[in-house]
Image (tube, helix red, strand yellow):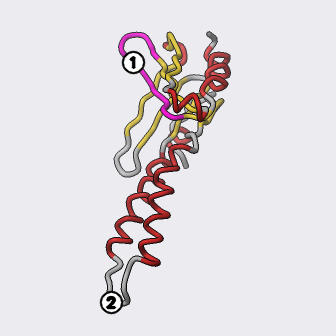
Amino acid sequence: MSYVVKTLSKDEEILENLNLHWINYLSPGIWLAFGCLVLLFGFEPEGSFVPGIIVCAFPVWRFIVLSSEEMVVTNKRVVFKKGVIATHTEELKNAKIESVEIRQGILDRIFGCGSLCFSGTGTSKVKFESIDNPWEVKSRIEEYIGD
């Protein structure tokens, strides 16, 4: 069960559950493929499998970390949660949101990803990084929060 589902208040419902862009999985995927090649072909019969296992362990951990991130918009708040063992959450009530910004670099524009930054009253901010189709998501979210 996800963090957001466990912390939903009465009459709160999930409106948008955002996904990371596929580009986030590219680098760990390449490293995992490299690690598998090292395991299969990189050793003599009396060699050690430790280097290949180490090369495979880091991308597997990165996949676990990426899959544990939650970026959710409910009818009452915006929530970002990251972390597997130790977790960190950022939440901002929809009534307190003043602006929603999109940040995209050149490669982000080419691949269709970007970051959404929610700014609230005071210094509160929530940032959804490397999400898929940030322009479409921004339009939908602004309908939900009433801007």
**Left or right: residue 130 compared with residue 84:** right
What mark, if any, has residue 59 been given in the picture? none
Asked which quadrant contains residue 134, the reply is: top right
What mark, if any, has residue 46 been given in the picture? 2
Q: Give the range drawn in magenta.
A: 119-130
Residue plotted at (49% across, 64% down): 33
Label 1 and label 2: CA atoms lie apart by 57 Å
Disc 1 and disc 2 in contact, CB within 8 angstroms: no
Residue plotted at (59% across, 35% down): 111
Asked which quadrant contains residue 91, the reply is: top left
Which is the main secondary structure of the residues drawn in magenta?
strand
The residue lying toward the viewer, choosing from 37 and 50, is: 37
Task: Please say if 147 is above or below 127.
Answer: above
Q: Give the residue number, with chain letter if any, for mark 1.
A: 124
Residue plotted at (51% across, 35% down): 130
| Amino acid bearing label 1 | Ser
- Residue 126 inside the magenta-drawn segment: yes
- Residue 61 inside the magenta-drawn segment: no
The residue lying toward the viewer, choosing from 53 and 13, is: 53
Task: Find residue 108 and report its horizontal and vertical position in percent.
Answer: 53, 31
Quadrant in which the C terminus appears = top right
Residue plotted at (38% across, 43% down): 87
Q: Earlier in the sequence, mark 1 or mark 2?
A: 2
